[in-house]
Image (tube, rainbow, N blue to C red):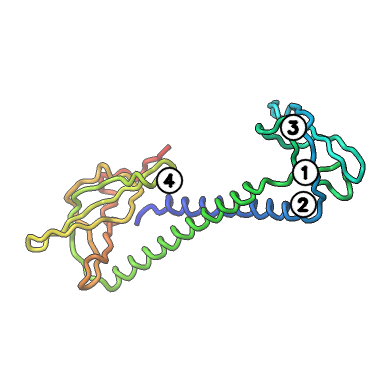
Amino acid sequence: MRNKKPIKFLIFTFLIFGTIFTCVGVVMNVININIRTNYTPVEATITGFESRKTNDNTDDMHTIIDYTLHGEEYSTVLWSYSSSWEIGDTITVYSNPNHPDRITQGVPIVIGILFPTIGLTAIIIAVYFLRRERRLAKKKRDLMENGLTLKATVVDFSVNTNIAVNQRHPFVVEVEYDEFGQKHRFKSEYVWQNVTSLDLGKEVTVYYQHNNMDNYYVDIDEIFTQDDNVDTNIIYH
């Protein structure tokens, strides 16, 4: 099918997005495992909150905590904050065994689970579309090499609004073949070019498997020529 760039872009985007999220999730979990294995858990009491300016001049909230470790009392600022925290609440933090005044909470477990889950889901989607494209390409090649052919007429087209790439929806072109009064209708693969000005009544070749017209391929490419009314130079924004 002409203009495969949107599908390739979709696969590439999901693959990169998924890989980044998965890697970040793995790093987060490695950090958490290291903290919970090598750091000392401490019960700390929230004694206050403070707002600090960030580099972009926005307010960033931090939490002031007190805790006791090995008989020594410490007061420090925790670089995390939750709107559910109140002064007097007790939270668990982890102290660096070599520097008891340095503490951390690690990465929230939910975040550690969420990132790789989203990442792996995106990768699975990318693999699905990649295998689908390869399967369709093989089907097209096999039918064009070994299948039977017929000439069908373009009778309609529609837009699949369930799929969008860069705010573009693919078209599906419907063609019809009249076999001694018995009409057969076939649908094309996704067409990412604008077909709204396509002249109905044009003929295209349909390749199909012998004794199985349900296994077919509509060669819509042959109607996209320089002489057609379809504008192939549209730039979508």
Q: Earlier in the sequence, mark 4 or mark 3?
A: 3
Residue at left offset 74%, top offset 34%: 89
Give the residue type at disc 4: Val
At numbered mark 1, what does the secondary structure look like: helix, strand or loop? strand
- Residue visible at 28% across and 73% down? 146
Task: Tell me the quadrant of the picture where the N terminus can be found.
Answer: bottom left
**In x, y percent, where is residue 175?**
20, 55
Residue 102 image point, x, y percent: 84, 42
Mark-to-mark CA distance, 2 and 3? 20 Å
Gap between marks 1 and 4 measured at Cα? 44 Å
In this view, the mark in front (2 or 4): 2
Mark 2–mark 4 Cα distance, whole angstroms, equals 41 Å
Disc 2 residue crowd, few under 14, some 14–19, many 20+, Cα 10 Å: many
- Whether residue 213 sits left or right of residue 116 in the image: it is left
Q: Nearer the viewer, residue 30 or 20?
A: 30
Q: Which residue is mark 2?
A: 35
Q: Please tell me whether mark 4 or mark 3 is closer to you in this view.
A: 3
Spatial distance from mark 1 to mark 2, Cα to Cα? 10 Å
Q: Is residue 6 left or right of residue 46?
A: left
Q: State how far apart marks 4 and 3 are (Cα).
A: 40 Å
Earlier along the polypeptide chain: callout 2 or callout 3?
2
The kind of residue tagged 3 is His
Amino acid residing under circle 1: Val
* Residue beneath disc 1: 93
**Location of mark 4 (residue):** 165
Q: Who comes first in sequence, dot 2 or dot 4?
A: 2
Dot 3 or dot 1: first in sequence order is 3
Pick whichever of labels 1 and 4 is earlier in the sequence: 1
- Image coordinates of residue 10 in percent, x first then y, are 46, 51
* Quadrant holding the C terminus: top left
Residue named by callout 3: 62
